[in-house]
Amino acid sequence: MKTEVIKKNNTEVAVVSSDELLITDVQSALDLIMTVKYETGCTNIAVNKGAIVNDFFVLSTCLAGEILQKFINYGVRFAIYGDFSKYTSKPLRDFMYESNKGKDIYFQPTASLAVDKLSGCAKNKKRDSYER
């Protein structure tokens, strides 16, 4: 796991990247939250999609809801970055679209756009929104 803290718009964002799965269940998500908060002090975390178990993106497993609720409960804003084009489920696309309109959870194509969203610098809403 590699963690880089990026400061933008007076906001620190921990950008986490890993070739290994970091989030496989609720407990591993909590472990990541606590580790990143302890090591960096950041309450804004961006994680690459490849570090998250694929079941997260199957809404019928309820894993996404359970994990994202932990980020909200612990006051952590969270972005997942990567290529989501392989996911064609309309409910998932709608979920990503609605999340990107909020203030706490984002799905972005790049780490840079994830940092922009978490730091409040996102300018072009079309670039990061998902079609329904």
Image (tube, rainbow, N blue to C red):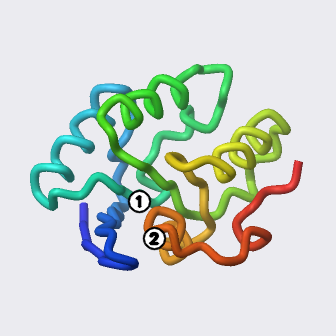
How many labels, in total? 2
Q: Badge 1 local density, few (<14 within 10 Å), some, or many (20+)?
A: many
Q: Residue furthest front?
A: 10
User: Image quadrant of residue 127?
Assistant: bottom right
Q: Is residue 22 above or below residue 28?
A: below
Q: Are marks 1 and 2 in contact (CB under 8 Å)?
A: yes
In the image, taking residue 6 as reference, residue 100 lies left or right, namely: right
- Residue at figure coordinates x 33%, y 66% from the top left: 13
Q: Badge 2 local density, few (<14 within 10 Å), some, or many (20+)?
A: many
Which one is nearer the viewer's eye here, 83 or 94? 94
Residue 39 point in image, percent of width and height: 11, 57
- Residue at figure coordinates x 64%, y 45% from the top left: 99
Label 1 amino acid? Ala
Residue 52 point in image, percent of width and height: 45, 45
Residue 7 point in image, percent of width and height: 30, 77
Local secondary structure at mark 1: strand
Q: Residue furthest left?
A: 38
Q: Is residue 125 above or below residue 73?
A: below
In this figure, which residue is indicated by the disc labeled 1?
46
- How much space separates mark 1 and mark 2, taking CA atoms? 7 Å
Q: Is residue 96 above or below residue 60?
A: below
Label 2 amino acid? Val
In the image, taking residue 64 as reference, residue 69 lies left or right, namely: left
Residue 15 point in image, percent of width and height: 34, 66
Q: Residue furthest right?
A: 132
Q: Is residue 90 above or below residue 130?
A: above
User: Image quadrant of residue 45?
Assistant: bottom left
In this figure, which residue is indicated by the disc labeled 2?
115
User: Image quadrant of residue 6?
Assistant: bottom left
Closer mark to the observer between disc 1 and disc 2: 2
- Residue at figure coordinates x 44%, y 30% from the top left: 67
- Looking at the rendering, in which quadrant would you find the N terminus? bottom left
